[in-house]
Amino acid sequence: MQYRLHAGVIAALLAMVASASALASEAVPGTSLEGLLSLAKESNPEYASMRFEAQAAAERVAPAGALPDPKFRTEWMDITKMGEQNPTLLPANVGSTRYTLMQDIPWFGKRDLKRGIAQFEADGSQGKALGTWSELAARIKTAQAQRYYLRGNETLTREILDLMARLEQVAQSRYAGGLTAQQDVIRAQVEQTNMRNELVALESESLQVDARLNALLARPATAALAPPESLRPLPAQAQLDSAVLEQRVRSRNPQLFVEEARIQSAEKNRDLTYRNRYPDFTLGISPTQTQTSVKEWGLMLEVNIPLQQSSRRAMEREAEAMLSAARSRKEAAANQVLAELAQNLVAIEAARRTEALAMSSLLPQAQLTFSSALASYENGKLDFATLLDAQRQIRQAKQSQIKAQLEAQMRLAEIEKLLGEEL
């Protein structure tokens, strides 16, 4: 009975420790890319400002197409009654009082055009917000990939440091037996010192990357980040078809979306400029009060006369030029975006092939070379410099592998930034 009680207490304590560990891991971001992106979407101030600007632009659509506020006018006629009384403003004591209610009415279609312009400007602001998020997400993905690369490079450097320590022991044994010079021992120690210097540099670079990532997450620069678990799997080759991605970029790229909204807005503005050839109206109704009763009603129609044709033609030419400029900007942006897409597709394929070669050929060959060199050195058939070269080949092969992984992840982030969505 007592054993069961102790077992139950131990199980409860283990459960509490596991729960606390889980909560701690959840409280410190950095393990998964999805958690970082979710945190950035909630807290990044730059993205928040762009979302608020898009919201503000959307709120301008309704007022843009609304009628102007009506105007009310009061006129006091004969406030002295032909000089028979002192001036007064009491409607019952003046000769007559005219009340005029006026409403400005734009020419037919102008309100719809103004509303359309505001709507496309709101769409452009929404596109800018999407572009800001795409840029922010790409920077977070790149930083997370760099963190993984630096962590892998640190692990590799420590492995090489341990290997050099073992090689130093081998050199010490051979030197003690008079089979080699003391220079081999010293070179092994120098290599270890170089490895320790590289660890210091890697630690510094990791802290810098963490600071940049924390800034993107709106966290203190020195806030703790959990180590990354793994890299995202690369998409299948079929998902990287250039023709398919080109169509997706043309339809989904935030920058092109913004430029298209500018073209639509410029077209509406051009149409509105041509519509300004026609006059706007002001309608009014005017009841006239005499003493205490209203006995006279009047209607008013006011029309502005568009006589300044030269200035209007200039504004029309300006609107046409702005539309042409918007179309040219979109064409230039499309060319740039598609060129970047092609470059990233070529680079990600090269990184994939480099990683495959490092894993399947370069690393096994380097390991065989090192094993052979180590055996030959122990038998006195090879010098220490050649053994160090063989060790460096292993390190270079592993570094080539993790560097290719980093390059592929960075290119993937750039492609998704151009797409405006995940692959």
Image (cartoon, helix red, strand yellow):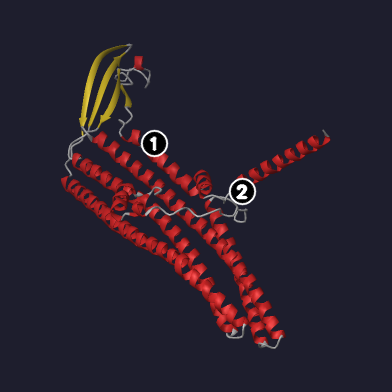
Residue that label 1 marks: 59
Task: In the rendered view, tell whether residue 191 sits above or below residue 361.
Answer: below
> Mark 1 falls on what kind of element?
helix
Indicate the position of residue 82 as horizontal and vertical percent values.
29, 19
Cα distance between the residues tagged 1 and 2? 38 Å
Indicate the position of residue 171 as horizontal and vertical percent values.
66, 81
Which quarter of the figure has residue 305?
Answer: top left
Which residue is located at x 25 percent, y 43 percent? 269
Task: In the rendered view, tell whether residue 118 sits above or below residue 195.
Answer: above
Answer yes or no: is residue 393 visible. no
Answer yes or no: is residue 82 visible. yes
Do the CB atoms of the residues marked 1 and 2 lie less than 8 Å apart? no
Front position in the image: 181 or 367? 367
> Mark 2 falls on what kind of element?
loop
Which quarter of the figure has residue 122?
Answer: top left
Front position in the image: 308 or 381? 381
Which residue is located at x 23 percent, y 50 percent? 323
Front position in the image: 101 or 123? 123
Amino acid bearing label 2 = Val
Q: Residues within 10 Å of mark 1 (few under 14, many from 20)?
A: some
